[in-house]
Image (cartoon, grey):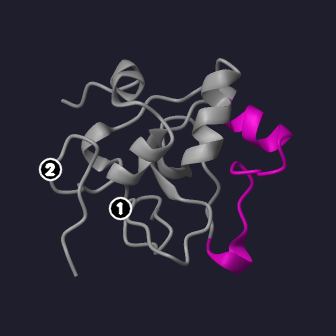
Amino acid sequence: MAEAKNVLGGPLELCSKDPLTGFFRTGNCATGPSDSGTHVVCSQVTEAFLTFTRNRGNDLSTPSPASGFPGLKPGDYWCLCARRWLEALEAGVAPPIRLAATHVKALDYVDLKVLKEYAVKDS
């Protein structure tokens, strides 16, 4: 299996281990045929985004102990569905993203120039 690439063309970097994210719960935003939501955008969630997605029927703030989901708080990194991030962009509440941890598949949905406008400045 080929190494996953990020939107910048380099190796896909870690998004978050705490909370553990990714469709495959590996900490990175890798994707595959079973990932129908295309969870490829490594985002630093904000209160505005969490409210937006909750209002769209996907509550990412409330913990779900049965599924091992801790619930997200502003500042957490999470692999978001590319379409949901795009919806948030159109609504003016797109959270910042970590480019090196965002899978190249995100470019099927959003232009790199737009993604770069939302890039977090990692220290």
- At x 51%, y 68%, the residue is 23
Identify which amino acid the numbered label 1 is placed on.
Answer: Asn
Residue at 54% from the left image edge and 59% from the top image edge: 38
Q: Position of residue 52 (x, y in %)?
A: 75, 33
Asked if 54 appears above or below 94 in the picture, the reply is below
Quarter placement of the C terminus? top left
Circle nearer the N terminus (1, 2): 2
**66 in the magenta segment:** yes
Is residue 4 found left or right of 115 in the rendered image? left
Magenta-drawn stretch contains 24 = no
Secondary structure beneath disc 1?
loop
| Nearer to us: label 1 or label 2 | 2
> On the image, which quarter does residue 34 sit in?
bottom right
Seen at 34% across and 30% down, the residue is: 112
Q: Which residues are magenta?
A: 49-68
Amino acid at circle 2: Gly
Q: Quadrant of residue 31?
A: bottom left
The quarter of the picture where the N terminus appears is bottom left
- Percent position (x, y) of residue 50? 68, 37
Q: Is residue 51 left or right of residue 90?
A: right
Task: Report which residue position mark 2 lands on.
Answer: 10
Q: Dot 2: within a 10 Å radius of its alpha carbon, few (fewer than 14), some, or many (20 or more) residues?
A: some
Residue named by callout 1: 28
**Residue 59, numbered circle:** none
**Residue sitting farthest toward the left:** 10
